[in-house]
Structure formats: structure tokens, C-alpha cells
Amino acid sequence: MVKAKGYSYAPSIPQYIEELETLNVFGVEADFMEKFRQFLADEGLPGNERRRVFTIPLNVTYDFGKKLQIIRPKRKADNGKEYDFKKDAPVPSLGQLTEYLQLHPVVSDWYPRIQSIHSNKTAEAIRTDPVKLADRHISLLNMDKLYFELEQFKRERSWYNLNVDKAGIKKLLKDNTWYELYLPAARLQPASFDDVALLQQVAAELLKRFCDHYYNYCKRSFIEPRLELRELMREDDNIPQDEFYQLIVDGSEEQVILAIEKLKKELEENKQSLLKVGELQACNFGMHLFQPLFHVRKSGKITILPVALNESEFQFVTDLKDWSETNAVELQNDGIELFLLRNLSRGKGVGFFEAGNFHPDFILWMIVDGKQYVTFIEPHGLLHEGPGSEKVQFHKRIKDIEKRFANPDVILNSFIVSWTKYPQLRWGIPQDEMEANHVLFMTDNRDGYINVSAV
């Protein structure tokens, strides 16, 4: 309230002020347009004001008469909307610990990074038992900096319902039961500002990993009991509601524009089910619930909305298409029907908090003898994963979900289809053992990794 002699004024909060506060300011200097173009380029969007937008029909090809089952949160009795963790769950606050979080600690290993800096392999690079941060280390940390780093971290992930404060940060750091830290003990004896800066980085990483671990634990605890099997309907969020794809390109890219126009014409004429023009590929696959499907070469100049496939995803679709066409007679004789759906991203598709909010790329339904085998498939490189990865182990955990549903006519499975070749992994596990644990190798065995009987 602002008061002056004879007047009073209560300022109102403008509508959409929260959205306005999230806008990036590019500056008022002469190069602000260049900065803006670079921002668009970093986001994969064309920066030319003369951009061209081409539309291609997006056809949902399935009539949903088979009552395909999909995993979704239950609907609330009062308004019919699905349960939403951010809106309906208690607000999680940083600093709270549970037995689960202590039994499943955060792991932070700094030895690989230290080895990359000290490539002469000094004694410091030999990994030993985990260490802990003591009060004397915590007293050296900049709590304000840690707080603002965590605020930025949660904003980047849209965790606006996570409560973070400095008291919670300090409480968490003083309790060392929730993490395993692998760091040379000498680094815990800071002798310079650089050593203190390293401790600051170590603490920030531990806290960020805990935030991720804790937030997904809270989400899983709230959503898991509220999951159900439900019939997939046309209005499901996993089915694009758009009537057209949009192919967006910079207006100056004449060759790319010609390629789009050529591909669009060929799709209209139904010349082939697989098309490739320049950096753009398209696939018409009748078993997929909407088509066509598009792939643009990495670092290509075309943006496709609402969804496009990356290289491994597109390869899997074309391999499944070839396999289903080759085995069409056998599938028909065995009474097997197949349906495939690209699982959309977070917020729309099916995700599993049991595996760190894992959203597999595809859902494959196999219908035979009155049963539905619902298989979640992730064509994915594994160079940055390990045999203990939550994605790799999910084929076991999905069986717990299946038991909770207690529906004998719905069988759940999960597979990783590795884009990384087996010899590159060096996990020390025989290939046949990995395949038995639902890790298949699409580049090593293009003709044999797809086997519907395995699902």
C-alpha cells in the first residue's frame, strides 16, 4: 500500500507476471539480435526471420478397438483429472531423510576426474574407501552459493514444488548417512583456495544428486499406489492431438526446402513406405498408432513438431517394420497382432519412477490368445551406463508393477536395445547373459535381435 496526502494506492500484481519473470533478457547492446539468433540455434530452432513452415498430415491409423492397455495415474473422484504429484502431493522439503534414502545412498566418485587432471597416475589416483565431509569442511562452504545453485537446478527441472532452504542444506550436509563419496583423503585437508573451491563443487554435486534421488523417491511414493491399467483412448496424452506435422526451416536453406517439398509430394503419392531425401527420412509403418514417422540427421537444419525420432529410434522402427513384413504370414497363422507407439516425453508419456523417472522410447503391444504383452523398449546407447543402471535393471522391477496390477491377461516387459556394440561396453558380462537380462544389440545383430516370442 502506497499512501500520500489525500490518496492511497494498492498496486495490483499484473497477470502472467510469473511467466514474464522467466523471460531471458538478451541485452540492449548492438549485438543483441546476434545473441538472440545464437540462443535459437542452441535450442535447435531457425534464426532467420524468413522461416518456412511446411505442414504434413499426421494420421492416427488405429481405431482403438482392441482395448490396448496403458499405465496411467488413477483419476480423482472429485474432478476426473489424473493424480498429479506437483499439484496433489505433500510438498517435499530438502533435509528430510528416510530409511530408503539411507539404504540407497547417493554415490559420487571423483577419482575419474582427478585421474584426467593428474594423468601421471600418482598415488592420489588410487581409489580407496569412501570418505565423509566433517564439520570443519562444512564450515568452509558458501551456503548462499549452494542455495542458489540448488534453486537453479530445480528450476531447470521444473521442480517448483520442491522446498529448498539453507537450514535444510546444512542439516543434510551434517548427516553423512545418505551418500558415498570417493575422493582422495588428501583433498579433505584444504591448503589453498583451490582446495576449498573443490570442496564447494563436491558438496554441490552431492546435494544435486540427492535432490534428484529424493524428488523421484517422493514422486514414486505418491504415484505408485495410484497407478492403474487403463484402455488407451484417442485423447490420451501419448497420442499427438495435432492434425499436422510442422517442418520448420530457415528461409535461406533452398536445398533443404526443395528436399522437404519433394518428400511431401512423395508422401502424398504414397510412393514408398520408406523415404529419404537429403537429411530427412520418413517411414509409413501401419503397426504404429500414428504416421508417418520422421528422422532428421543429427545437426540437421530442420525442426519437426510435435515429435521426431533420433537415429537409433528410427533404426529400430525400420528394423521392426522389415521383420514384421518378412514374418507376416507366420504372425497371421499364430493369431498375433502387433501395435507400436512412440512414448512421448515427460509430462505426456508413460514414465517409471522405479527407474529414476525412466521414459522408454516405445511401447509395443502383442495381442495373442486373449492376452496383451505390453513391452517397453528403449533403443539407447550404453556407453554412459553400467550393468547396475536403473534402465538396465528395469526389466526386473517392471515385474513388481505387473504383480501390483494383478491382471493375468496383461504381461509387462522391458528391453534395452543397445545402439552401442557389445565389444565397446567392456562390462565383463557375456553377451548371451546380457541378452537374457533383456539387453539386445541392434548394431551387432541387425537380422536377429528382434524376436516377438521373446516379449
Image: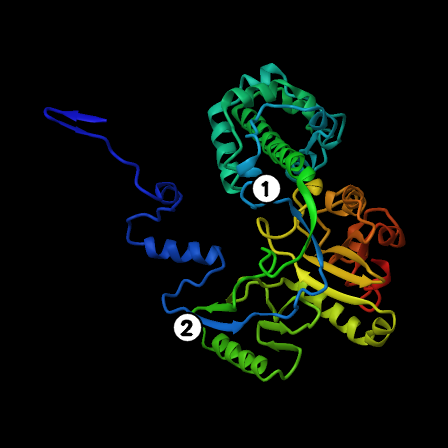
**Observer-nearest residue: 186 or 295?**
295
Percent position of residue 97, x then y:
65, 23
Quadrant containing the C terminus in the rendered view: bottom right
Indicate whether 50 appears above or below 238: below
Which residue is under mark 2?
252
Task: Residue 60 in the image: state x and y as whole percent.
Answer: 61, 68
Left or right of residue 11: residue 412: right
289 vs 417: above or below: below
Q: Is residue 285 above or below residue 13?
A: below
- Say which residue appears at 63% left-offset and 17% top-offset: 134
Q: Residue at x 78, y 43 (%)?
A: 397
Asked whether 124 or 144 is in front, the reply is 144
Q: Amino acid at mark 2?
A: Ser
Res 250 seen here: yes
Figure quadrant of the N terminus? top left
Q: Is residue 314 left or right of residue 446?
A: left
Is residue 142 in view?
no
Q: Return the mark for residue 47.
A: none
